[in-house]
Image (cartoon, rainbow, N blue to C red):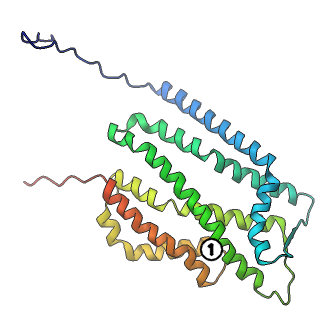
Amino acid sequence: MAIQPSPPGRPEIVPVEPPEEMTLLEHLLELRNRILICAVAILIGLVVCGIFWETILGWLLAPARERDESFRVVSFSPVDRIGVVFKIVMYGGVIIASPVVIYELLAFVVPGLTPKERKLMLPTMAGVLLFLLGGMAFAYWIILPASLGFLLDFGSDQFENAIGAKPYIDFVTRLIFWVGVAFELPMVLLVLGRLGVVTARQLLSFWRYAIVLIAILSAIITPTPDAITMSFVMGPLFALYFLGIFFAWIFGKPRRQPALA
């Protein structure tokens, strides 16, 4: 189609060519490059944690030793120590590399987002890291001491606290990691609201069912059977659910009203 000349006295309108879309092969190459960057970041995290594994192990043992100064872990097989170090290195390496992994994941999907949604990428990435680290810190300083206090004091007049190294590290890392993941609830609701899957009104009306689901999740995460420790997980998660409703209300995508006949 021919371009009509601009009227005299007005600047000539120059058509702007739309950006070319990437081919399937180019998408695959980009995905490969981003996966390689994530792999390198994880490898660097593994090396760092491999160098400082003794320091990290001391951090993981500190909550139990604060409750019982005589507490110690023992190895029951020749491979226990290697398994403990391997788990520490794996979890620590992934956590260290998580900022790079999250950034590469979001950067891969950015071309398919609108300009307004692209502006939300950096705050979203920061929010994911903030809630993950906040949940892990909450588990380490609040939930873990309470859980160990109950478990180590239970039957202490009949049992000596000499725990296997592998079961202890499994217990601590599982608790810290999954509480950190559970604290991502507000960001999950934000993304669902932004995609138009749910609305703040729907989430608010769902609060009774949310209590039941959060209670079940807290019971799975909490390693002790007492209600007090379980409430340490359930209370913050319920508060985070309402924070997620607020995020969905602020950043949610409004649904189109059906046209009237």
Residue ranking furthest to the bottom: 157
Q: Residue at x 38, y 25 (%)?
A: 21
Q: Residues within 10 Å of mark 1 (few under 14, many from 20)?
A: many
Horizontal and vertical percent for residue 217? Answer: 54, 71
Which residue is label 1 attached to? 222
Quick check: 31 above or below 105? above
Q: Quadrant of the C terminus?
A: bottom left
Horizontal and vertical percent for residue 125? Answer: 49, 47
**Residue 157 picture quarter:** bottom right
Quick check: 96 above or below 65? above
* Residue in the foreground of this view, choosing between 209 and 85: 85
Q: Residue at x 58, y 30 (%)?
A: 33
200 sits to left or right of 241: left
Tag 1: amino acid:
Thr
**Residue 132 picture quarter:** bottom right
Q: Residue at x 86, y 89 (%)?
A: 158
